[in-house]
Amino acid sequence: MASVRDDRGDAEWTADARSILLRHRTPSTGWGYRTGAAPCVEPTVLASLALRTGEHHASDPAGTAVRQAADWLTAIQQTDGSVGVSQRLRTPGWGTPYALLLWKALGGFVAEQRRASTWLLELKGETTPLSADPERVVGHDTTLVGWPWVAETHSWIEPTALAILALRREGMARHARVVEGLRVIRDRAIVTGGWNCGNKAVYGRALRPQPGPTGLALLSLAADRDRTELVDRAISYLRSHLPDVRAAESLGWGLLGLRAWGEWPEEANRWLFESFTQVAGRSDAAPRLALLLLAADAQSLEFFNG
């Protein structure tokens, strides 16, 4: 079990979290979903970005670990520009926007970013005509094109939001794909506030929102600063539900979404600490600790909407 400090006042838990995160790393590559597992793109990027937070992000060993992780991503990038789940799992390529976010944060990966952006722009979620669903089983506009988890399948909220964030960081905020991706996000908003992983309603009945997808969706909308009623409902949903959430992924993305709109809750630091104490000793702590660290640092928004 990892040793942690009970120090809610000055958030000293973040130093412990960074130390634990480094211990979970696979040398010269990155992070897996569990300690000792093969490195994967998502936890590697989240951990690397998290280590870029705070005042000493460039110092060894954190700086070396992050640079090696970025180099590892270049080594596993496919010739078509995509980045898979891991070195072994080359498809699907939903790791591509994650890789783009890290390369952009570090700089010096222009060719890799160009190839990845080109591939990401070509990846499209499958659509169906509205006439194919006369009973409106699916509650959203199935003709809009976003991004799927897997090629030749329908668009989902999380891969669409991540693609938007990555492409916008590449200077493509006005690209037609990004503009339509934002339409997908807005169209999938649940009427009561927030988002879930895909649908907003089935047979006319609104589905339940989830904190993680809601936070990601709010992040993707934040750069436009268009605070619509849709955004306000999502913020209200997170403000009412996050006080009871300690699952690190849901809390981390949820708080990042609120922070992007200037809505940081007064008790958020305590929630982060309590979540940290629950995950610090787990073998699957790395991606969870990373999200908690990203949520705790206001400057981390630069990685997503800077």
Image (cartoon, rainbow, N blue to C red):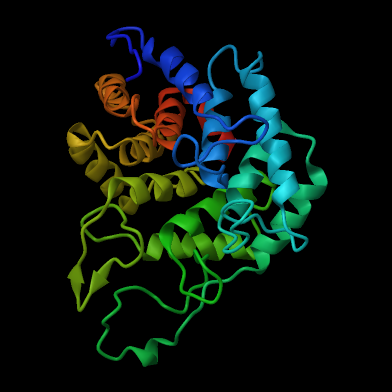
Residue extending farthest to the front is 36
From the top left corner, tell me how far across and down residue 156 is, in percent: 43, 64
Instruction: Evaluate whether residue 104 shows in this view.
Output: no
Q: In front here: 282 or 202?
A: 282
Q: Quadrant of the N terminus?
A: top left
**Residue pictured at 37% horizontal, 14% vertical:** 13
Which residue is at 65% across, 54% downward? Answer: 83
In this rendering, the answer to whether 256 lies above or below 268 is: below
Residue 64 appears in which quarter of the rendering? top right
Residue 33 percent location from the top left of the image: 46, 42
Q: Position of residue 209 (x, y in %)?
A: 25, 54
Q: Is residue 229 above or below residue 204?
A: above
| Image quarter of residue 63 | top right
Q: In the figure, residue 15 lies in which quadrant?
A: top left
Residue occupying image coordinates x 51% and y 46%: 224
Residue 211 versus residue 279: which sits nearer the camera?
A: 279
Q: Nearer the viewer, residue 275 or 174?
A: 275
Q: Nearer the viewer, residue 261 or 62?
A: 62
User: Number of marks in the image?
Assistant: 0
Residue lying at 60% horizontally and 36% vertically, measured from the top left: 30
- The C terminus lies in quadrant: top right
In this orientation, does residue 264 appear?
Answer: yes
Is 203 situated above or below 64?
below
Q: Residue furthest right?
A: 111
Say left or right for 11 vs 274. right
291 horizontally vs 7: left or right: right
Residue 100 image position (x, y, % from top left): 65, 46
